[in-house]
Amino acid sequence: MRYYIILVFATAVMSLQSIFSKQYNRKCGSSDPTLYTVVLTFWALLFFCVLSGGHVQVPPQLLPYAAGFGIAYAAALGGLNFAISAGPLSYSCLVNSYSLIIPTLYGIVILKDEIRITAYIGIALLCASIFLINKKKEEGKLSARWILYILTAFVGNGMAAVIQKMQQLKFDGAYKNEFMMTALAAAFLILALIALLQKKDVRAGLKGCWKYAAPAGVANGIGNLSTMILGARIPSAILFPTFSAGTMTIMLLASLFLYQEKLTKVQIVGYAIGILAICALNL
């Protein structure tokens, strides 16, 4: 029973990451999504460093997987934060979750996983969801900038899941904490370099973003740690659909009632179908 309580807690905490990102963009007039993502990643990394107590041994064979994951993670998190700054929270989080199709296809094509009926159902529901949520009036169409950002997040998130799967298979599920710490360090360095190359006033930007990015980073760390712990204690058929559907439901409610985003009834139906699609792809 306690593990299911942890699952509910982790779902709520992970949802806070996107809510903090939205709050940052609403409250700070001159928001800098790149710097925000740097600070968020730093706090997520710090969370795992404190958790390890400084006792970490990283085998050299782990480094290529960690570097690849770090690049994908930086693209995923940066793209999502930019998308949230440029468009609606509801669509940004939903389309980002659609990236589950990438590891699903990787399993089918590369690993020769058995194609389950739920995969066909999930893909069909996903297509229906995309069609329905895209039924907007012309003046409410999403910007090309938002589409670029969310596509970056989509590919990055999907590839991060693929690389993590490759690492788990290569090391038989070992070095999870070491992998996450090394990957977050790589992502932090990449994002910090990008932030420095922008030649913006970092000190001024930090004043506005740290109070949102720091708790978002800790929430990210707690969410990732919880799923790693629960993965060995709750069946995957329960864990991942519940986690995905729970976070997306919270995002929908936050979008509608906290941020007053205007969704038609058809789009809400499309969003609900999207949640079902994510659940089916996780089964």
Image (cartoon, rainbow, N blue to C red):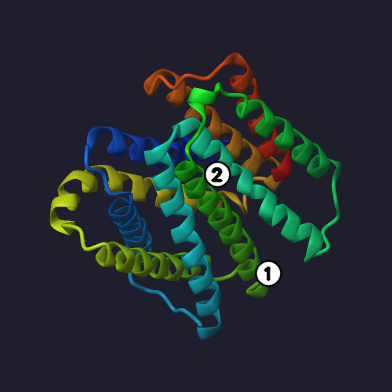
The residue pinned by badge 2 equals 96
Q: Is residue 165 above or below residue 83?
A: below
Query: Can you say which quadrant of the picture contains the N terminus?
Result: top right
Residue 256 relative to residue 265: left or right: left
Q: Is residue 224 above or below residue 271?
A: below
Q: Earlier in the sequence, mark 1 or mark 2?
A: 2
Q: In terms of image quadrants, where is residue 208?
A: top left
Q: Is residue 148 above or below residue 250?
A: below
Q: Nearer the viewer, residue 27 or 211?
A: 27
Residue depicted at 65% across the width and 48% down the height: 100
Q: In terms of image quadrants, where is residue 53?
A: bottom left
Q: Tell me residue 186's x, y (percent).
A: 41, 70
Q: Taking the image as drawn, is residue 174 in sight? A: yes
Q: Is residue 133 above or below residue 146?
A: above
Residue depicted at 68% across the width and 47% down the height: 236
Q: Nearer the viewer, residue 214 or 135?
A: 135
Assign a secondary structure to mark 2: helix
Q: Nearer the viewer, residue 174 or 25?
A: 25
Q: Tell me residue 67's x, y (percent).
A: 49, 73
Q: In terms of image quadrants, where is residue 133?
A: top right
Assign a secondary structure to mark 1: helix
Amino acid marked by disc 2 = Asn
From mark 1 to mark 2, how far is it between C-alphas?
A: 25 Å
Most extreme residue toward the top is 265
Query: Can you say which quadrant of the picture contains the C terminus?
Result: top right
The residue pinned by badge 1 equals 169
Amino acid marked by disc 1 = Leu
Q: Nearer the viewer, residue 107 or 190?
A: 190
Are there few (<14), some (14-19), or many (20+) residues within 10 Å of tag 1? few
Residue depicted at 22% across the width and 37% down the height: 29
